[in-house]
Image (cartoon, grey):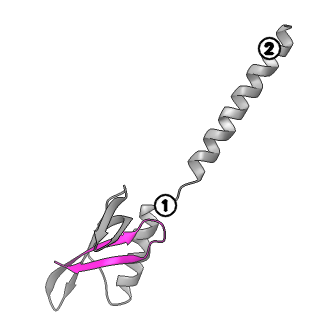
Amino acid sequence: MKLQDFLLGVATGIATAYVIKEASEKVSPYKNANSVLDDIKDAFKTQGPIDGSWIFMEPQLFHKESIEIPVYKGGISRVEDGEAVNFEFAADARTGSVVDLVRV
């Protein structure tokens, strides 16, 4: 085997590994958690200002009756009639749709 053939094989292998790595990182079944939070905050802002918000960056399984889906859990706080009000939500990690909203 010639050195040139060997080096060509090594270079091809490295290039292929790099392309596969980059492609696999870009393909995610879930929306970005910050994007989901921004969409939910925008929906809340239509009803008035918000004071704070948070979201867990890793999806968690959400169970309700016979449904089990990956969700991002988070919360929004705002002031209504001079009192602090907090909401917790669960948003579908694939679509960003709110599947559960609870006033706490």
Q: Amino acid at mark 2?
A: Phe
Q: What is the quadrant of the C terminus in the image? A: bottom left
Q: Quadrant of residue 57?
A: bottom left
Residue at coordinates 35% horizontally, 83% vertically from top-left?
44
Q: Quadrant of residue 99?
A: bottom left
Q: Element at badge 1?
A: loop
Q: Nearer the viewer, residue 84 or 16?
A: 16
Compared across the picture, whether 32 is left or right of 66 comes to: right
Residue 97 colored in magenta in the image: yes
Provide the residue span drawn in magenta: 86-104
Residue 73 visible: yes
Where is residue 97 drawn, in percent x and y?
A: 43, 76
User: Dot 1 corresponds to which residue?
Assistant: 30
Give the main secondary structure, helix, strand or loop, of the magenta stretch.
strand
User: Dot 2 corresponds to which residue?
Assistant: 6
Residue 81 colored in magenta in the image: no
Compared across the picture, whether 100 is left or right of 21 comes to: left
Examine the rendered structure and indicate whether residue 39 appears above or below residue 24. Answer: below
Residue 53 visible: no
Residue at coordinates 72% horizontally, 27% vertically from top-left?
13
